[in-house]
Structure formats: structure tokens, C-alpha cells
Image (cartoon, grey):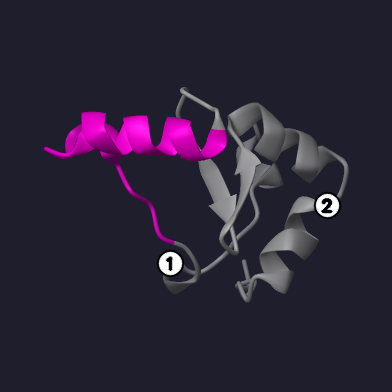
Amino acid sequence: MLSQSDQLKFSAQDYEIIMSLNCPQGPQLQKVLERLTGQHTVPNVFIGGKHIGGCTDTVKLYRKGELESLLSEAGASKTES
């Protein structure tokens, strides 16, 4: 996982989180996501409408220096610390 100091700071309006496990439609949502992405685990991360994978994939993108540019290209704006 990312340490607190490694976490990118993006404002809340820049992303949407769907907590599928905590909503009544959770099981149905998980089945649809699995059909669309082939991934049955959570989290199931999308940036700019493109599926990038799960947590491990997201951390790999961060460590390779590619995550911030994907977020920027999707229109997310970095906030000041």
C-alpha cells in the first residue's frame, strides 16, 4: 500500500467512489463489473472511464510514475497539501 506521504492529493469532486459492498445492489453490481472487466475482486478502479485494474495495479502505476498523468488526463486536479 501507499504510505500517507506517498498518497496523491486530489479533491473530492474529482472522483466518484461506489461502495458496492455497502449498498443493496452490491452483489448485482459486482457481477456486472466482473462481466465488463473480467475482475471479480475489489477495488475495481476506473480512471476517465477506463478500467485500470485493482489496488495492486493502481499502486504499480503510481510507482512507475504513470498514475498522476492518467488522473490529470481524466481531468482530475491536484490539490495543494
Q: Quick one: label 2 or label 1, which is nearer the N terminus? A: 1
Give the residue number, with chain letter if any, for mark 2: 66
Labels in figure, total: 2
The amino acid type found where label 2 is placed reads: Glu
Residue 40 point in image, percent of width and height = 46, 23
Residue located at (55% from left, 37% from top) = 37
Segment tinted magenta in the rendering: 16-37
Residue located at (70% from left, 33% from top) = 57
SS at circle 2: loop
Left or right for 62, reference 21: right
Secondary structure that dominates the magenta span: helix
**How crowded is the residue under tag 1: few (<14 C-alpha within 10 Å), some, or many (20+)?**
few
User: Residue furthest toward the top?
Assistant: 41
Residue 81 point in image, percent of width and height = 62, 66
Query: Within the magenta stretch, is there residue 61?
Result: no
Foreground: 57 or 26?
26
Give the residue number, with chain letter if any, for mark 1: 12
Q: Is residue 40 above or below residue 68?
A: above
User: Residue furthest toward the right?
Assistant: 64
Residue 70 point in image, percent of width and height = 74, 61
Left or right for 69, reference 74: right
Question: Can residue 13 be spotted in the picture?
Answer: yes
The amino acid type found where label 1 is placed reads: Ala
| Quadrant position of the N terminus in the picture | top right
Residue located at (77% from left, 34% from top) = 60
Quarter holding residue 22: top left
Quarter holding residue 50: bottom right
Q: Is residue 46 above or below residue 63?
A: below
SS at circle 1: helix
Q: Is residue 77 above or below residue 18?
A: below
Determine the CA span between mark 2 and mark 1: 20 Å
The mark found on residue 77 in the picture is none
